Image: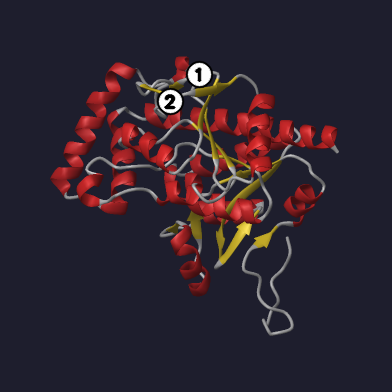
Amino acid sequence: MTALPDSPSAAAPAQAVRVSEEVARAVAEGRPVVALESTIFTHGLPRPRNLAVALEAERQLRDAGVVPATIGVHAGVPTVGLSTEQITELSATDGLDKVSLRDLPVVAALGRHGGTTVAATAFLAHRAGIRVFSTGGLGGVHFGASESFDESADMTVLAAVPVTVISAGVKSILDIRATLERFETYNIPVIGYRTRKYPGFYVTDSGHEINFAVESPAEAAGVIDARDRLGLPQAVLIANPVDPAKQLPPEELDGILARAWAEAERQGVTGNASTPFLLDFIQRDTGGRSLEVNVEVYRGNVRLGGEIATALAAAATSGS
């Protein structure tokens, strides 16, 4: 890992973003690299499962010949390619900031630790030259957004950052129909992986159709290369559904979500506090089953991200 200078000066300014030597070398050599966000282990999963899942994702990619680039903020430094020690420290630290793009300069200036959201992770990955980013679920439009204006910054950032994001759809607690409409407004292509049924994170089918699907990592890589040749600025979203055998029973999900929203309203939970509250409620209401689905979703997206990154690297090599 490249070290920061002890005393920043005009001759040796502090780095705005630290990129690990391993990640920088892999990007420069055209080898496959996949970005991973840190909020899954700083805010999304309970201890000690959070650390186990974070390290498993890195190991899963390495076993496939792909370089993992876990992204987060450590001691005020946005870092692409956190070390095992840094991941371990962040996963065990209380009171971490949840860092979206707007928060990056603040936590950097204050020297704080933070887990990066999809928005901040996508920005930092692109800045480091990484083309593929695997996550669990995306942010989107919240119910009641026509009055609250509660929409995730993920969407506006992905409209301007040309990465490829593999997810299992948007989080089930969101207004999926409105989110898909917003993706269309922002000219963000949404492509199913071997399906035209948009997944709903915990379930394979949210009930919404999408226009396009790809059948292989090579086809996905072709779309990404075409986007880049056209010089378009937006992300490509690959919607990868969880294995149907491992999803939450779809007939249960509507009732669970209704109870979650009712409890949030009763307790007056709004704004940024809504998502963690609702996800925690769902986990408790399902007796932990939703947590297992969450982990399966992530494993599948990490696997597919590695395959697409490998296909992109192979296409670049064959075309050179």
Q: Nearer the viewer, residue 112 or 92?
A: 112
Amino acid at dot 2: Pro
The residue located at (23%, 46%) in the rendering is: 146
**Horizontal and vertical percent for residue 182?**
38, 40
Alpha carbons under labels 2 and 1: distance apart: 9 Å
Mark 2–mark 1 CB contact (< 8 Å): yes
Q: Is residue 92 visible?
A: no
Q: Residues within 10 Å of mark 2 (few under 14, many from 20)?
A: many
Which one is nearer the viewer's eye here, 166 or 297? 166
- Residue type pointed to by label 1: Thr
Q: Position of residue 63 (x, y in %)?
A: 73, 32
Q: Position of residue 108 (x, y in %)?
A: 52, 69
Q: Which residue is mark 1?
A: 195
Q: Quadrant of residue 285?
A: top left
Quadrant in the rendering for residue 140: top left
Q: Residues within 10 Å of mark 1 (few under 14, many from 20)?
A: many
Q: Give the left or right position of residue 125, taking residue 21 as reference.
A: left
Q: Please state, as top left, top right, bottom left or bottom right, where the C terminus lies in the image.
A: top right
- Residue drawn where x is 42% and y is 37% of the image: 184
Q: Nearer the viewer, mark 2 or mark 1?
A: 1
Secondary structure of residue under mark 2: loop
For mark 1, give the secondary structure. Answer: loop
Residue holding disc 2: 199
* Residue 44 percent coordinates (x, y): 43, 44
Q: Which mark is residue 89?
A: none
